Every structure is written in C-alpha cells, then in structure tokens.
Image (cartoon, rainbow, N blue to C red):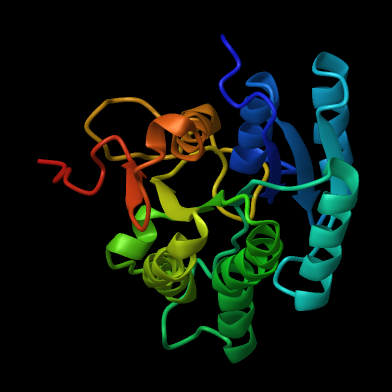
C-alpha cells in the first residue's frame, strides 16, 4: 500500500482495543504517527509497542479518561509535545447501558454513559480544535457513531441517546470549525468486533445485514482513513454509514 497519510499526526482515543486499535494500526501503516490514547495504559502501551515494532517511532501510548476535561487537556498537551502538532483526531470511546430500559436504568449509569459516549466527543474536539485554530493549519475530526443512534433500541436507552446526539453535535462542530479549515464527520458501524465495553466477540453473535458477513474493525479503520484523507477533503458535517445495509434490512 502506498502511504496516503504520510506525515500526518493523529490522536486516536479508545485505541487500546477493537476499532480504535485497528484505526491506529491503519494510520501507522499509511505513514502517520499516532498517539494511542486509552483509559487503560497497559492496553495503549501494548498497541503502541506492536505498532512501533513494525513501523518504528509511529506510536505513543497515553492514558486518559476522555470524559474528564483535565485528562483531555493533559492528553492534548502530551500529544503536541510528543508529535509537534496534531492534524487529525479520531474519537472511538463509548460505553453502553445494555441491557436496560427506562424502568430500571440507574441514574448514575445514565450520566456515565452520556459522559463517556458523548461528552468525550465535545471535550476532545474542543481542546484539540483550540490548538489547531491557534496554529492555523486546519485539521480533521472523526467521531465513531453507531446505528444504535439511528434507530430505537429495546434493550438500551443512554447509549442510543448519546449516539443520536453525537450527530447533532458533529453538524454544529462542522459549522463552527469550518471557517478554520477543520472538517468534522462521523463514521457509523453496526455490530463491529466485540460488543461495546467488552474485549471478546461472541462466536454466536447474531447479525442482520445485507452483505452476509460480519463487519470487522479493519472495515471501520478503512472508512476512517478515507474520511481523514485528501480524497474526502470536500466532506464535512455528515456521516459515513458502514453497516452492511443493516439499517434497511428487514430480515424478511
């Protein structure tokens, strides 16, 4: 593969496993340097080591809880100190309240899911964009959405609410940051890799899509690589749905 992200500098959150790790790997393979950020430093360090073994000096591990402003500010300061500047942000962080309904969802879990799955997108964009704007270089931001934010769920409430709100957030971010040459989009998978909040994909996990096979983290990494690259330079404020037709599949 000809490196298409050569010279790029990226922060990928939730990069200690699953989709985030695949995105960090794709970026490194295409010539970018990456801050591998995760709440679990051991996981981030493992991913960064694997990348550096193959692509020397491509990855820097950083521990951060990106639902907390102080952690995000520290992450951003570290990213700039380590890589010189950042032109790309990808936010892959989320947790779920599945299984729950409005009748039994604890109040504190509602708040925690929204903090991790939505507020993290606000905080990471805010503090990365402030530095991008100050440098006047422009940049690109991608948040990972979900088909759960585009349809009703019978077994979760806070997670689909957070993902639905993410689309409105991204549209407004695109409007506000567009004058600074910063593009903002989402990429939305359906049932990719291990379920949200887990490390292992069940062998019997059911899927309902039109292509007849499972979505992989690498599928999403490829879509994100496209969205942050030059071929997508005229795309902002929108969503790239990578769901194998799941949203339109009837199952009949």
Res 200 seen here: no
Q: What is the residue that sits farthest to the top in this orientation?
A: 1
Q: Nearer the viewer, residue 202 or 197?
A: 197
Q: Nearer the viewer, residue 45 or 239?
A: 239
Q: What is the residue that sits farthest to the left in this orientation?
A: 252
Q: Quadrant of the C terminus?
A: top left
Task: From this view, report whether residue 101 is shown above or below residue 198.
Answer: below
Task: Find residue 4 and report its horizontal and vertical position in percent.
Answer: 56, 21
Res 110 seen here: yes
Q: Would you identify the image quadrant in which residue 91 lies?
A: bottom right
Task: From this view, report whether residue 58 is shown above or below residue 102.
Answer: above
Residue in the picture at 49% in, 65% down: 177
Q: Is residue 142 left or right of residue 3?
A: left
Q: Nearer the viewer, residue 217 or 169?
A: 169
Residue in the picture at 42% in, 75% down: 157
Residue in the picture at 49% in, 30% down: 216
Residue in the picture at 63% in, 56% down: 136
Q: Would you identify the image quadrant in which residue 47 lies?
A: top right
């Amino acid at each position: 593969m000809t490196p298409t992200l050569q010279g790029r500098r990226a922060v990928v959150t939730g990069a200690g496993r699953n989709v985030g790790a695949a995105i960090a790997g794709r970026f490194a393979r295409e010539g970018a340097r990456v801050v591998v950020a995760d709440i679990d430093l051991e996981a981030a360090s493992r991913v960064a080591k694997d990348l550096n073994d193959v692509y020397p000096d491509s990855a820097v591990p950083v521990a951060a809880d990106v639902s907390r402003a102080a952690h995000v500010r520290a992450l951003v300061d570290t990213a700039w100190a380590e890589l010189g500047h950042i032109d790309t942000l990808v936010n892959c962080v989320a947790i779920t309240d599945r299984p729950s309904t409005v009748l039994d969802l604890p109040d504190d879990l509602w708040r925690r899911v929204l903090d991790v799955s939505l507020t993290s997108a606000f905080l990471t964009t805010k503090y990365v964009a402030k530095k991008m704007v100050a440098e006047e270089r422009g940049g690109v931001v991608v948040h990972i959405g979900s088909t759960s934010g585009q349809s009703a769920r019978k077994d979760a409430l806070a997670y689909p609410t957070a993902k639905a709100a993410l689309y409105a957030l991204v549209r407004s971010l695109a409007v506000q940051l567009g004058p600074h040459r910063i593009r903002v989009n989402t990429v939305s998978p359906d049932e990719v890799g291990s379920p949200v909040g887990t490390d292992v994909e069940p062998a019997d996990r059911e899927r309902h899509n039109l292509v007849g096979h499972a979505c992989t983290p690498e599928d999403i990494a490829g879509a994100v690589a496209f969205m942050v690259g030059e071929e997508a330079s005229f795309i902002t404020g929108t969503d790239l749905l990578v769901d194998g037709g799941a949203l339109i599949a009837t199952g009949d």
